[in-house]
Amino acid sequence: MKYISTNGATAPTTLREALLAGLAPDGGLYVAESSVRHDLRTFDDCDDLPAVAARFLTPFFAGDDALEAPLPLICRRSLDIETPLVGLGEGSSLLELFHGPTAAFKDYGARFLANSLAALRPEDAHAKPLTILVATSGDTGSAVAAAFHGLPGFRVVILYPDGRVSKRQAHQLGCFGDNILALRVPDGFDRCQALVKQAFGDADLRERVPLSSANSISLGRLLPQATYYAHAALRHHRKTGRSLSFVVPTGNLGNAVAALMAREAGLPIARIVFATNANRTVPEFIQSGAYRGRPSVATLANAMDVGDPSNVARLRFMMAQDPSLAAALSAVSIDDETIRARIRAGERDYGQVFCPHTACAIEALEQERQRGAKDDLCAVATAHPAKFDDVVEPLVGHAVTPPKALAVMLNRPAASEPLPPQFEALKERLLRL
């Protein structure tokens, strides 16, 4: 399989080169040059997520000598995380993706990317370390830090918006040390993302500091995320004989595009609803067909505070390739007051405490039901509510116990550095690594 840029000005390249580069030279995002379509019988002997993932990803890795052979091992090492499908009532369910080491769905893709890049690293002890440069609106940074922490030949630099992540998220970002550096930027996520893109576009910097990405712009994040949708859809289909529709809380659109990739590859997925917060860029695009990025708005669901999502480039590419895709998509924006109401009612209505992002998906699911939707709907739970204790606990009226791995991180000391929101400051700091 070869990979091309959504901007169309980069020659087809290998998966190896696409993973190492992160962003295409023309500023676009890498996508598969040809479509992949699976027969469901392909997965007949696959039960757990690592097995489904290895089978699902085989065509995407085909022809890459450095990655095709170790793919099953990469999947086994990276994706041995639970993905429970929890019933929420007749025809509705919840896909829990927060059982990894940092209690967020980002763990699946981050661990997969780390193991893939480790397979590509030269054995030369004198080779320059690869710097993983990542912007985060909350959960990506800690997942990437956990995945690469202590990994020889790698260092991670995280940019996050100061004051616009939860206190526990900020603590996670700064609790690793060693080969992990957290930089807090006095501006929103979109500025952090713009700085990262500018760094990848600076040829002088990349010559002096080898860079790669771990944001959802990276294929190494996107491809494995498609596999838990494939796995969930297969489980549901085997049990019921029906396709599953997903309601995905989304900000930078990586998780949502991953669900679309699984559907386009032939998995039994009926339709996909994008649930956003008050940042309405994506719902407006889906409804009108006209895209207008804008500065992000701060909300309770801070990990989705994205006004100009990068993965719109992949979404538009996919819609151009398959015009029928638009009929399977919808999007809805959920305001803060409605998020609060859903969190308050979670235990009463479902016996569940939801994080703000999952609450967006639950609200979107209920709106679908109110509009008469009869299909099997699965909301996606993207993070454990204990990561957002400052928002969730006052609403539910009691403490939310952190999972064990999160509790360990919260007991470590944490530190971060301030970074002015100018590219010159970021470049100078990267050169001092």
Image (tube, rainbow, N blue to C red):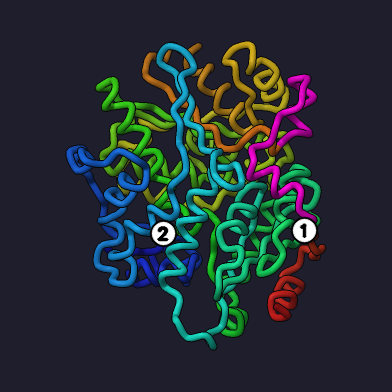
- The residue under the point 36% across, 66% down is 15
Image quarter (top left, top right, bottom left or bottom right) of the C terminus? bottom right
- The residue under the point 67% across, 61% down is 158
Q: Is residue 89 left or right of residue 66?
A: right
Image quarter (top left, top right, bottom left or bottom right) of the N terminus? bottom left
**Mark 1 surroundings within 10 Å by alpha-carbon count, few (fewer than 14), some (14 through 19), many (20 or more):** many
Picture layout, residue 35 above or below residue 336 = below
Asked where in the image residue 18 lies, by quadrant, the reply is bottom left
Asked where in the image residue 133 lies, by quadrant, the reply is bottom right
Q: Where is residue 432 in the image (x, y as percent from the top left)?
A: 73, 80
Q: Where is residue 344 in the image (x, y as percent from the top left)?
A: 70, 18
- The residue under the point 41% across, 59% down is 6
- As rendered, which of 327 and 258 lies closer to the eye? 258
Which residue position is annotated with label 2?
6
- As rendered, which of 418 and 192 lies closer to the eye? 418
Find residue 404 and name its label: none
Picture layout, residue 245 above or below residue 195 = above
Cα separation, mark 2 vs mark 1, equals: 30 Å
- Which of discs 2 and 1 lies nearer the camera? The answer is 1
Does any portion of residue 270 appear in the rendered image? yes
Tell me the kind of residue under disc 1: Arg
Find residue 184 and name its label: 1
- As rendered, which of 99 and 142 lies closer to the eye? 99
Q: Is residue 50 left or right of residue 362?
A: left
Circle 2 SS class = loop
- As rendered, which of 420 and 45 lies closer to the eye? 45
Picture layout, residue 424 above or below residue 419 = below
Q: Position of residue 228 (x, y in %)?
A: 40, 41
Reply yes or no: does residue 91 show up in magenta: no
- The span picked out in magenta is 388-414
- Total marks in image: 2
Q: Position of residue 381 (x, y in %)?
A: 54, 32
